[in-house]
Amino acid sequence: MLDDDSFKDIKAKAKPGKFSSPEVQSGIPVPATQKVKLFSPDEWEEFTEEWTYSLKGQFDKVQRYGGAGDMGCDVVGFKTKDRVKGPWVNFQCKHYDGPLVPSKSWVEIGKIVYYSFMGEYTPPVAYYFVAPQGVGTTLTKILNAPDKIREGLIEAWDKHCKDKITSTKSIPLVGAFKTYLEEFDYSIFDSLTLAELVEGHAQTPFHATRFGGGLPVRPAVAPPPSSFAKDESRYIQQLMEAYSDAKKVPITEVTQLDKWPSIKRHFNRSREQFYHAESLRNFARDNVPAGTYESLQDEIYQGVVDVCESDHEHGFERVKKTVSKAVDIALTGNALCGRVLVNDRQGVCHQLANEDKLLWVENGDD
């Protein structure tokens, strides 16, 4: 029979210290640089495509190729609408159990040279090998010296490229093509380290959902500007209609609210709430996948619309009841729920009013 002494060795290997509830439930967090090494080839390409989002502003469009007939292109960033006929960058995803070596790379370099020679595309302005296990020392040295790439490709052509560029024919290194290969600009070839990729990916909206670890802390929300922005005109107009409905007098200017201090305070709070929600929208754009914030808006809309469309004494009462209802809605299913504040929930109502999805005073209201 086993007794407690039988487990001494196992206990001795346990990590000392206190563990948080998430660690007990999910285990000790695994660094992203280790997780990516467990990706499948398709997942690695997806990760690389997501990483290009960190280069926003550099490309007009990013497209993922892969598979038969890709002509040596995996994840491609087009700098103009001319696509491969204009300046473009190729990120070549190579997924192996160990670091990338020259013998696995010559054919990829050869494809770029051959297909650009054939006029399928202009040579890329930059070409990066990206591999979860990194690029080996030998290949790194070659990539750092364009002349070595040229010499190595010529030497390796018959063994690694001639019959592997395309499955339909053999490509001998002769004639005009040989001249083109010898004069090709090999300085475009380089590699990216795993650390560079993970660091860049951490700046994208995809990082938290792919690797976990939670969302970053939201920056402080600046107070509303003193002047009204064009993109907040409709919800402000709706508030004025609601106030008019309550006081039974036309209210079209904010200065008129000075007659009713409580309404003026409500108006100022409403603007703060709107800008809180706008701040959350911007935070979501940079930290979670597209559509996450819109899903949050829809959840709040579904939670408040019945209140909004119920009978109320006047439009101002409808505003207050609807916005108050937003505070009580459970948002546990949304990736942003841990970063949503009360002001955000209320501000979403004003965003919805800004788009006429919520109406404070409808035609036919008294």
Image (cartoon, helix red, strand yellow):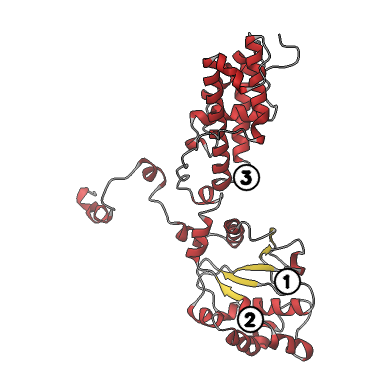
Cα separation, mark 2 vs mark 1, equals 18 Å
Label 2 vs 1, first from the N-terminus = 1
User: Who comes first in sequence, dot 2 or dot 3?
Assistant: 2
Q: Residue at x 66, y 68 (%)?
A: 89
Amino acid type, callout 2: Tyr
Residue 177, picture quadrant: bottom right
Q: Give the CA separation, mark 1 to mark 3.
A: 30 Å
Three-letter amino acid code of the residue under disc 1: Met
Q: Check disc 3 and give the amino acid type.
A: Ala
Residue at 76% across, 80% down = 117
Binning the other alpha carbons within 10 Å of mark 1 as few (below 14), some (14 to 19) or many (20 upward) gives some
Q: Does residue 189 lie above or below 215 as drawn?
A: below
Q: Nearer the viewer, residue 80 or 182?
A: 80
Q: Between residues 124 and 169, which one lies in front from this camera angle?
A: 124
Q: Which mark is residue 71?
A: 1
Q: Give the secondary structure at mark 2.
A: helix
Neighbours of disc 3 within 10 Å: few (<14), some (14-19), many (20+): few
Disc number at residue 250? none
At 63% from the left edge and 27% from the top edge, which residue is drawn? Answer: 301
**Local SS, label 3:** loop
Q: Where residue 144 sits in the image (x, y, percent)? A: 54, 80
Q: Quadrant of residue 150?
A: bottom right
User: Circle 2: is it few (<14), some (14-19), or many (20+) Cα within 10 Å?
Assistant: many
Q: Residue at x 24, y 56 (%)?
A: 9
Q: Earlier in the sequence, mark 1 or mark 3?
A: 1
- Residue at numbered disc 3: 290
Residue 91's place in the image compared with 346, above or below, is below
* Residue where numbered disc 2 is placed: 186
SS class, disc 1: loop
- The residue at the far left in this view is 5
Q: Nearer the viewer, residue 234 or 75?
A: 234
Which of discs 2 and 1 lies nearer the camera? The answer is 2
